[in-house]
Image (cartoon, rainbow, N blue to C red):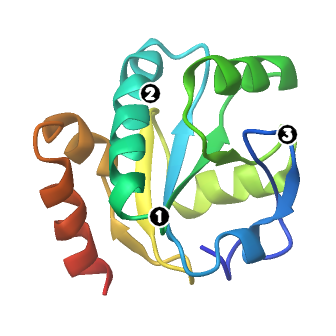
Amino acid sequence: MAKMLSGVTLVTRDGVEVDAGKYLDGKVVGLYFSASWCNPCKAFTPKLKKFYEEIKKRHPEFEVVFVSRDRESNSLVNYYLDQMGAWTYIPFGDPKIQELLTKFEIKTIPAMKIVKPDGKVVINDARTEIQDNMDNMENLYDGWMACYN
């Protein structure tokens, strides 16, 4: 994703804007498509947060980028700050959001994809895999890495 998102601004948990290309360089990236108005998203987000926090302890190279389907900036930011982990998001209104929705054929949310630096999808339905493997998070991540490398 680093190559594909180069030049795109991401916002960190601290509100700092960073260049996605530099920030994601060398990282294994999960794109998380979600929105504050989506009840299934609100049910899955705490699971993703737990997964992220556990995996980050042993795999600091793992990163999530929130790609919001919210209809206004305040909804995106409040949802992110209230419920999400210490990952990054693409700011509201950035045209890259629509580009990613189209490229990855996102029809429903929540959705999560694990992608390589060039944008190639490695894991198409990471959301279901996380949801179904909360007891085996490390094994799940190891399986992803077998596909990633």
The quarter of the picture where residue 114 lies is bottom left
Q: Secondary structure at mark 2?
A: helix
Q: Quadrant of the C terminus?
A: bottom left
Residue 138 x %, y %: 19, 56
The kind of residue tagged 2 is: Thr
Residue 27 x %, y %: 53, 73
Q: In this rendering, which labeled residue sits more in front, label 3 or label 2?
A: 3
- Find disc 1 in the rendering and name its residue: 60
Q: Image height check: is 110 above or below 31?
A: above
3D distance between C-alphas at marks 1 and 3 = 20 Å
Which residue sits at x=38%, y=54%? 57
Q: Image height check: is 60 above or below 66?
A: below
- Disc 3 crowd, CA 10 A, few/some/many (<14, 14-19, 20+): few
- Which comes sooner in the sequence, label 1 or label 3? 3
Say how many tags the image has: 3
Q: Secondary structure at mark 1?
A: loop
Residue 47 x %, y %: 34, 29
The kind of residue tagged 1 is: Pro
